[in-house]
Image (tube, rainbow, N blue to C red):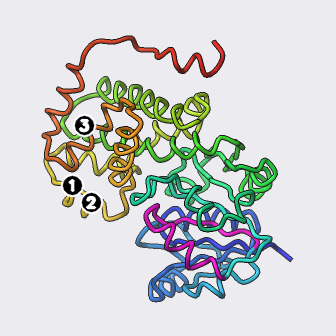
């Protein structure tokens, strides 16, 4: 009998992963919180709201009842917004069976605690620490759902769990690497959304490729700066969940964070931009959380700071760029990174 995989969250990413896993010949159940929405997807065999144009195979069951969804599920994929993770974990906790694996695909930091999302899982479900895998990397749902070649990373405290889920998700169109650096993988996936917002703002102001390249490159530096302080391997930030995810999020037409930033750069308020995007923009919460962490550790993150001031303090976007360009001069390469990797 085929293994049952439950996918929690019928947004664009949850739907794309359900389609992908069904193509890998698993029995997939997709959970939508709203019963009417679940029935609509099931009837149309399409998630017209979040992933239009992608047909759901008949083998995917769409439902809103958690007990039925999780019955017999060997693997449970969490594809809900980062600020909903703890709530959904609490709902699923009484229904979990000890031999299942948990996969988190959300990219963010919990607003109320500043925790990485794997830390939220472990806080709520400590017994699953070595059965928890984080799936991250440069992977837009619009492309994965259509079978466009993509590469991601499965990270875990347990090599065995990471390699098991690597086999589950791997296909001719989705290449999966493994990592034991949960700190680096999660921070890369969360913090790149801040830089993508900044890159979008610059684009909305009418600035060109030079400006965006500077923001992406220096943004990666401050992501790594905080990551190294929190215990990440600096080399992780040169890989798929660092540079790879940052580039695709800052550059792609599919990126919600880039689009929200673009609208803000064009003069829309934060609320107006979020309403026009129409889906969760993870970078907004992450900007506020990352700034709090940076201040507590006294880590310099100038792009994050200016993005925060634009989003929450009314700083004009063009003034933010001017402040960044006129900061005091310094060397480009930071010796602390080389010390960590043995040079």
Q: Is residue 341 left or right of residue 196?
A: right
Q: Residues within 10 Å of mark 2 (few under 14, many from 20)?
A: many
Taking the spot 45% from the left edge, 84% from the top edge, the residue there is 34
Mark 1–mark 2 contact, CB under 8 Å?
yes
Quadrant the C terminus occupies: top right
Mark 3–mark 2 Cα distance, whole angstroms, equals 19 Å
Residue tagged 2: 274
Residue tagged 1: 270
Q: Position of residue 299 (x, y in %)?
A: 39, 31
Mark 3–mark 2 contact, CB under 8 Å?
no
Please give the range of residues in magenta. 74-94
Mark 3–mark 1 Cα distance, whole angstroms, equals 14 Å
Residue 90 colored in magenta in the image: yes
Residue tagged 3: 306
Which is more foreground, mark 3 or mark 1? 3
Q: Position of residue 300 (x, y in %)?
A: 36, 29
């Amino acid at each position: 009998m085929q293994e049952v995989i439950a996918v929690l969250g019928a947004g664009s990413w949850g739907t794309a992963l359900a389609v992908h896993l069904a193509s890998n010949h698993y029995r997939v159940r997709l959970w939508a919180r709203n019963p009417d929405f679940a029935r609509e997807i099931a009837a149309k065999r399409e998630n017209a709201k979040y992933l239009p144009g992608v047909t759901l195979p008949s083998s995917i069951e769409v439902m809103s009842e958690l007990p039925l969804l999780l019955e017999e599920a060997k693997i449970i994929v969490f594809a809900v917004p980062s600020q909903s993770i703890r709530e959904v974990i609490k709902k699923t906790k009484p229904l979990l069976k000890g031999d299942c694996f948990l996969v988190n695909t959300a990219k963010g930091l919990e607003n109320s605690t500043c925790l990485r999302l794997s830390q939220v899982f472990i806080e709520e479900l400590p017994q699953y620490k070595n059965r928890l895998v984080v799936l991250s990397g440069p992977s837009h749902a619009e492309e994965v759902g259509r079978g466009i070649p993509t590469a991601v990373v499965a990270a875990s405290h347990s090599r065995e769990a990471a390699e098991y889920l690597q086999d589950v998700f791997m296909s001719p169109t989705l290449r999966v690497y493994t990592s034991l650096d949960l700190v680096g993988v999660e921070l890369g996936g969360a913090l790149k959304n801040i830089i993508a917002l900044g890159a979008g703002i610059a684009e909305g102001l009418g600035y060109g490729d030079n400006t965006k390249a500077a923001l992406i490159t220096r943004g990666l530096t401050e992501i790594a700066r905080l990551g190294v302080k929190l215990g990440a391997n600096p080399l992780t930030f040169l890989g798929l969940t660092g540079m790879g995810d940052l580039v695709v999020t800052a550059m792609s037409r599919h990126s919600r964070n880039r689009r929200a930033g673009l609208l803000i750069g064009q003069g829309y308020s934060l609320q107006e931009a979020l309403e026009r995007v129409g889906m969760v923009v993870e970078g907004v919460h992450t900007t506020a959380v990352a700034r709090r962490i940076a201040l507590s550790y006294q880590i310099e993150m100038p792009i994050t700071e200016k993005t925060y001031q634009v989003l929450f303090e009314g700083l004009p976007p063009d003034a933010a760029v001017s402040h960044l360009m006129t900061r005091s001069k310094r060397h480009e390469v930071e010796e602390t990174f080389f010390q960590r990797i043995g040079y």
